[in-house]
Image (cartoon, coloured by chain):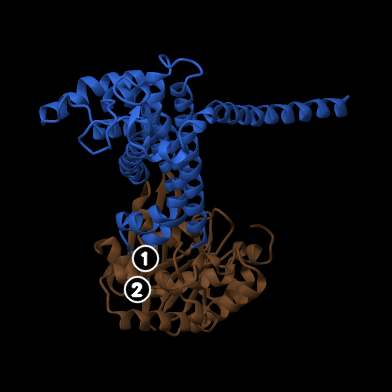
Chain colours: A blue, B brown
Amino acid sequence: MRYLQDRIFSFLICAFTALSFVSLLFVIYFIVREAMPLFSEVSPGEFIFGDRWMPIGYTGEPSFGIFNFIAATAAVSFLAIIIALFISIGAASFLCLCTGEGTREGIYSVIDLLAGIPSVVYGFIGIVVLLRIFFRVGVHTGSCVLAASILLSIMLLPVLISSCCESMLRARDEYLLPIKALGVSEWYGLATVIIPASWKNILLAVIPAVGRAMGETMAVMMVIGNANLFPSLLGKSETIPAVIALEMGTAVSGSTHYHALYGAGLVLMVMLFVINTAISILRRRLSRI
Amino acid sequence: MNNALTIEKLSVSYDNKEALKDISLKIPEHRITAVIGPSGCGKSTFLKCLNGQIMEENARVSGKVTLSGTDISKLKPSDLRRKVGLVFQTPAPFPMSIYKNMTYAPRYYGINDREELKRTVTEKLKLTGLYDEVKDELKKSAVKLSGGQKQRLCIARALTVDPEVLLLDEPCSALDIKSTSVIEELLLRLKETYTIVIVTHNLGQAARISDMTAFINDGRLVEFGETGSIFKAPEMEETKDFITGSFG
């Protein structure tokens, strides 16, 4: 009986693992299949490096270049992660050195609330708060890449703060006493030993954050202005998820436009894969030190 | 003989629970003083009082500790810790190169001259017998050293600020027999230059290397005296029971 139970249990576990793996494969297969027809009409080089996106030929020939979208996606995510990392490391430093366990748990639960807010609400706050500020300082309509990055960075905070804090707490428990035993101040120790020792684990938390940042559609779409322009800090631009969300509904199924949107999705997936691999390699480099 | 540390009527309590009760003893210069006693008797708390770490914990401390004539409560924590170094049970070399571990504290105290730093590193590593083992790979990560080497590096690191007293909190309990004997020899060499206080649960170790032994039980100093007499002819029945292994 016991044997049978064990067998059933292990079979179920294997089946669920296989299910998640197979569904990933199906997603990839589906996107690739839907994207492929595009490349019989537009060359991959033209698609990736072209900067003219004119899916329907109202004025002149249709053309499918997503270079600006790629650049905007990368720029917004990169900026957002940098901003969020700075804030998270600051917050984690505070939580590590200035608070007791009780206060820390209290603050954690408030930060976790941030994670529960739907992204459309973030977008709304972005429009009424951030865009107004940018508009007042002279950015035309207020929509810009920087606004999107700031908004996105706030959305990334809950995950990043808690994982930064966790790895820094571990390093603190290991190194803070020896640091203080040398008469060195705890803040100097934090900057020179504890934060460097935590980098490896912080990078581990950055991997899902990159995924979240590059895939975030709604909030970014609401504040970035959605214009096919090369991203500049205070200028409008448009990210790949935004293009897909905005145009998929109007693209005629089976048309080149439709396939091009899938192509853009494929490019997004490849970008994520490349960046995640790069971070993993960097982590391995760090752990060799 | 001069006393490096004089402890007078030292009492410590956490949340109204007394951890140390009315301890008075004089720790002589350039000697190894061992602190022995069963687990939880207050040995580590005693060490924390000597480098001021206790002040940062939620503890009530009364009594007086003087370090070569100065009341340590009058010293700034960083000044006190430059004079009284502490080595922990688990060696925790910082995750950086051996060289950087050794220059960490001197740099913090404003020494930036490369030659001087190099001299300090070489001198202290030689003192701990680590120099010959690592001289060609000072850039290697300290985390990759063996357990015993890590502990010797931590001792060397504690010495880089030139303390007068070196406190060791069960420095060998995470090490194998061979590394332990290397460290014991090292401590015997170091007592020429430094005053050493070692907390140990290893009675053999206390008997082998220390000149003076303090037996603490239940927060009280039961007996303090020359190691030879404590181990061969303890005055108190309690000490005798502990040494012969009846409890603890």
Image vertical order of residue A216 relative to residue A281, above or below: above
Image vertical order of residue B205 relative to residue A138, above or below: below
For the point 42% across and 47% down, the residue is A168
How far from the left and from the top, in percent, is residue B103? 37, 72
For the point 59% across and 78% down, the residue is B182
Q: Is residue B48 left or right of residue B238?
A: left
How far from the left and from the top, in percent, is residue A77? 36, 37
Image vertical order of residue A240 relative to residue B245, above or below: above
Q: In which chain is the residue bearing label 1?
A: A
- Answer few, some or many: residues within 10 Å of disc 2's Cα (few below 14, many 20 plus, some between 14 and 19): many
The residue labelled by disc 1 is A182
Residue nearer the viewer, B224 or A108 = A108
Q: Is residue A81 left or right of residue A37?
A: left
- Answer few, some or many: residues within 10 Å of disc 1's Cα (few below 14, many 20 plus, some between 14 and 19): many
Q: Quadrant of residue B17?
A: top left
Q: Quadrant of residue A36?
A: top right
Residue type (three-letter) at the residue carrying disc 2: Val
Residue type (three-letter) at the residue carrying disc 1: Leu
| Image quadrant in which the N terminus of chain B is located | bottom left
Asked if residue B233 can be seen in this view, the reply is: no
The secondary element bearing badge 2 is classed as: loop
The residue labelled by disc 2 is B161
The secondary element bearing badge 1 is classed as: loop
Q: Are marks 1 and 2 in contact (CB under 8 Å)?
A: yes
Picture disc at residue A3? none
